[in-house]
Amino acid sequence: MKRRRHTPEQIIRKLREADRLLAEGRQFLRWPSSWRSARRPYHRWRAQYGGLKADDAKRLKELTAENARLKRLLAEAELEKDALRELAKGNF
């Protein structure tokens, strides 16, 4: 079964809805069926997207992807430099 990914906008909308439900005094077990798939990740989402707006969350996701890409490029560059050092030493 394919996992469903929620977009940052969906996550923030669900967190706002959760805040409203909690303010009304409802518990997790009495939440609507649309929350059935989101009960487990609620706390993880709250930690990651707690005070963000939809635009901020989207930008955070873009920055995270860019950071991963830059780390990968740096790792490749370091491997190339290490290989060139080994060639310069004559240990091949």
Image (cartoon, rainbow, N blue to C red):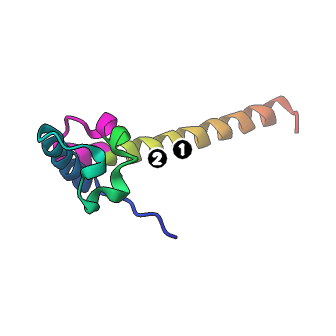
Q: What element carries label 1?
A: helix
**From mark 2 to mark 1, how far is it between C-alphas?**
5 Å
Question: Residue 76: x, y in percent?
Answer: 60, 43
Front-lying residue, 64 or 39: 39
Asked if residue 54 is among those painted magenta in the image, a careful observer would answer: yes
Identify the image quadrant of residue 25: top left
Identify the residue at horizontal 19%, vertical 35% (top origin).
51
Label of residue 61 in the image = none
The disc labelled 1 sits on which kind of residue?
Arg
Mark 1: give few (<14), some (14-19) or many (20+) Cα within 10 Å.
Answer: few
Magenta residues, dominant SS class: helix
**The quadrant where residue 63 appears:** top left
Which residue is labeled 2 in the image? 69
Quadrant in which the C terminus is drawn: top right
Asked whether 54 or 3 is in front, the reply is 3
For badge 2, the amino acid type reads Arg
Judging depth in this view, the residue of 24 and 74 nearest the camera is 24
Q: Give left or right: position of 8 versus 90.
A: left
Percent across and percent down for residue 53 are 16, 43
Q: Do the residues labelled 2 and 1 touch (CB within 8 Å)?
A: yes
- Residue positioned 24% across, 45% down in the render: 57
The answer to which of 39 and 90 lies nearer the viewer is 39
Which segment did they paint magenta?
46-60
Residue 75: x %, y % from top left: 59, 39
- Taking the view exactly as shown, the residue that stands out farthest to the bottom is 1
Q: SS for tag 2?
A: helix
Asked whether, in this view, residue 23 is left or right of residue 73, the answer is left
Circle 1 sits on which residue?
A: 72
Q: Does the stretch in magenta take in 71?
A: no
Kindly identify the residue that appears in the image at 20 percent across and 39 percent down. 52
Which residue sits at x=31%, y=49%? 29
